[in-house]
Image: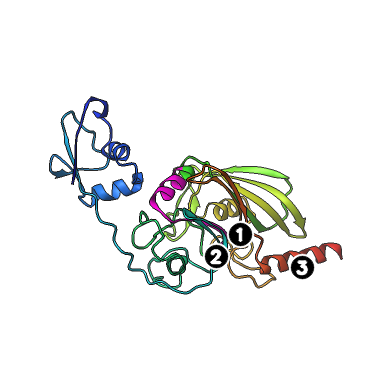
Amino acid sequence: MEEYIVEDEFVNLRLDKVISEKAKDYSRVAIQRLIEEGNILVNGKKAKPSYKLQKADKIFFEKPELKEAKIEAEDIPLEIVYEDEDILVVNKQKGLVVHPGNGNSKGTLVNAIMAYCKDSLSGIGGEARPGIVHRIDKDTSGLLIVAKNDKAHINISNQIKNHEVKKTYIALVRGTIKENEATINMPISRSTKDRTKMAVNKNGKNAITHFKVLERFKDYTLLKVNIETGRTHQIRVHLAEIGYPIVGDYVYSNGKNPFGVKGQMLHSYQLEFKHPTSNKNMKLEASLPDYFEEVLKLLRKEKQE
């Protein structure tokens, strides 16, 4: 149990912000969770993360022991793009859920990395998400960073929060886009009509997507996409909203395509970030999946005929 007495410099600041300053090994999200669970008390009582501290308040911080993850390790093949003692970068295959959730206790990326990394994973994500710093959708393939310790987890999380991680995707959309490049700036929130979906909503959270045309085909366009923000389903929602849904996306379009592709043709192609320990600039790439290349071959052949 650690005890802090609030001094003048912390008066009227949020409880979670002050603890984040005092305990730099924990992320702001982890601190908020610990406050809600009663591990952090003010004057012996539970308080909200937003509580404004007063002079001479006594903060009691009981640091929990890291729990051993209960998720079962599974021998699922992983394509490792980069690995060192701090991070693991994988090229996730389409159809693989990132972490366990309702109805998905097995067969996820987390199950796979637990078998691969064993005890070398950050505990910040809790029992269900050890090492997971960010995620991509089940049917989106490509690069994903996994943190092997808490220090790396906090560093990469902060880079993502500060928009310092550049994420580049490749997408095949229905329709021929005339512009060579454009920016979509439309706020996104949970759909009011279907809670399983996201939607453009003027009262939603800020969401910015940039795209550039790589290649045009008859009725289809290949895009390079960069995102400034990381809202749930952001690329899929934005492209569908402007009338160019991603091929195979059954949620934000009718999913119809002559190629028999199931799930959106969206690939996390490139990640640029700073290494959490060395601060070295990292730029990693993952080639398009075979099925994606095959579809492009068909379209190129059709264009030449």
- In the rendered image, which residue does mark 2 sit on? 139
Say if 222 sits above or below 69 in the image.
Answer: above
Q: Is residue 159 magenta?
A: no
Residue under label 1, please give it: 266
What element does badge 1 sit on?
strand
Residue farthest along the top direction in this orientation: 8
Q: Amino acid at mark 3?
A: Leu
Position of 258 with respect to 305 (left or right) is left
Tell me which amino acid carries mark 1. Answer: Leu
N-term-proximal mark, 3 vs 2:
2
Residue 302, x across and y down, in percent:
81, 66
Magenta residues (range): 139-158
Dot 3 and dot 1 residues touching (CB under 8 Å): no
Residue 127 location (% of width, % of height): 34, 62
Q: Quadrant of residue 42?
A: top left
> Which of the 4 image quarters holds residue 265?
bottom right
Q: Which residue matches tag 3?
A: 298
Q: Earlier in the sequence, mark 3 or mark 1?
A: 1
Residue ID at (72%, 69%): 294
Distance from label 3 to label 2 (Cα)?
A: 21 Å
Amino acid tagged 2 = Asp
**Do residues under tags 1 and 2 come within 8 Å of each other at their CB atoms?**
yes
